[in-house]
Image (cartoon, rainbow, N blue to C red):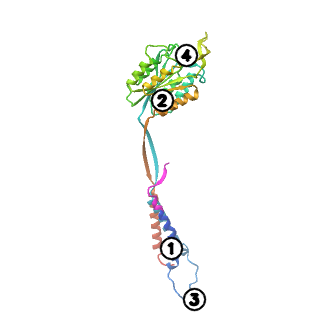
Amino acid sequence: MGETTFLHPQFFWLFLLLPLAIAWYLYTRKKEHATLKVPSLGGFKAAPSFLAKFRPVLFVLRLLALSFLIVALARPRTLDVNTRTISTQGIDIVMAMDVSASMLARDLKPNRMESLKKVADEFVDDRPNDRIGLVVYAAESYTKAPVTSDHAVVKQAIKSVKYDNDVLKDGTDIGIGLATAVNRLKNSKTKSKVIILLTDGVNNSGYMTPEMASDIADTYDIKIYTIGVGTTGSAQQPTGQVVNGQMVFDNLPVKIDEELMRGVATKTGGKYFRATDNNSLKAVYNEIDKLEKSEIKDKRYLNYDEKFRPFLWIGFILIIVEVVLRRTLYRSFI
């Protein structure tokens, strides 16, 4: 049900004339009947007729007719608004997530990897108009989800991320992670292309250096935001596995090559962030969300349903009834 509006509400000022019409009717009412002066009313004594009592109904009909015509002139109508949102400048984003064993460290709760997954999932929800992809890397890398507007696919990919040294060789090759992300974006036709690189360590393996990967990204006008994940000082980090596969943790110093991360981001026009706990990690994503905005255009379709016709017909009918009664039953003075 749409909202009722009036195209010409100024006609409602005509209602101010109705009290004046009532006052005029009361003032001139006695003059409606002819008068006759006689010395005695004895011969005229009779009960007033039924029609004479209801003669004011004619005036009431006229007032009602005028009221309905005034409402019709104001043009009542209902309005339904259909809004369609169109992203005229969507952003293509690839999240490159470190999944090495050190991401199981417990300085973020319950650990770095699970905390990253939770915030990344919320980030996807907050950018409904952009295409997003996911790359995971350790000493090797692969595309977990292609750049797509199907966010359900991306969210499922994020949910399924886990440490598995049977799938990826353990280690931290930031360069190969970046290169894979660049490969997913290099052919994108969008104006803005962004990589969000997440790592908790230093580049310690691989043949593709992060500097080389960032040079390639800069060539394709891809902006890189880097996030160093981990508290300052030391944290409970995995140091090995027992026979049943359970991780063994020990308190080890946190090492993040912040100079490298800052250089990679700056070269491409991005920015480096440090996330030391769950709250600061969320704040980092919020900051990136503010820095990289999609241009959105709303197309609004207005559907008007005119409602003045019933008021117009009722007004005309009341006028006709009043005229017919005045020229038939009330034709002569009573």
Task: Tell me the number on the disc at residue 101.
Answer: 4
2 or 3: mark nearer the eye: 2
241 on left or right of 187: right
Q: Residues within 10 Å of mark 3 (few under 14, many from 20)?
A: few
Question: Element under label 4?
Answer: helix
At label 2, the amino acid type is: His
Task: Tell me the number on the disc at residue 24.
Answer: 1
Q: Give, as a single range, the part of the protein colored magenta.
A: 1-12
Which is nearer the eye, 271 or 81?
271
Q: Residue at x 49, y 34 (%)?
A: 290
Is residue 237 shown above or below 303?
above
255 on left or right of 267: right
Task: Tell me the number on the disc at residue 67.
Answer: none
When asked about the image quadrant of residue 69, the answer is bottom left
Residue indicated by mark 2: 151
Q: Residues within 10 Å of mark 2 (few under 14, many from 20)?
A: many
Question: Element under label 2?
Answer: helix
At label 3, the amino acid type is: Ser
- Residue 7 magenta: yes
Q: CA distance from mark 1 to mark 2?
A: 72 Å
Q: CA distance from mark 4 to mark 2?
A: 27 Å
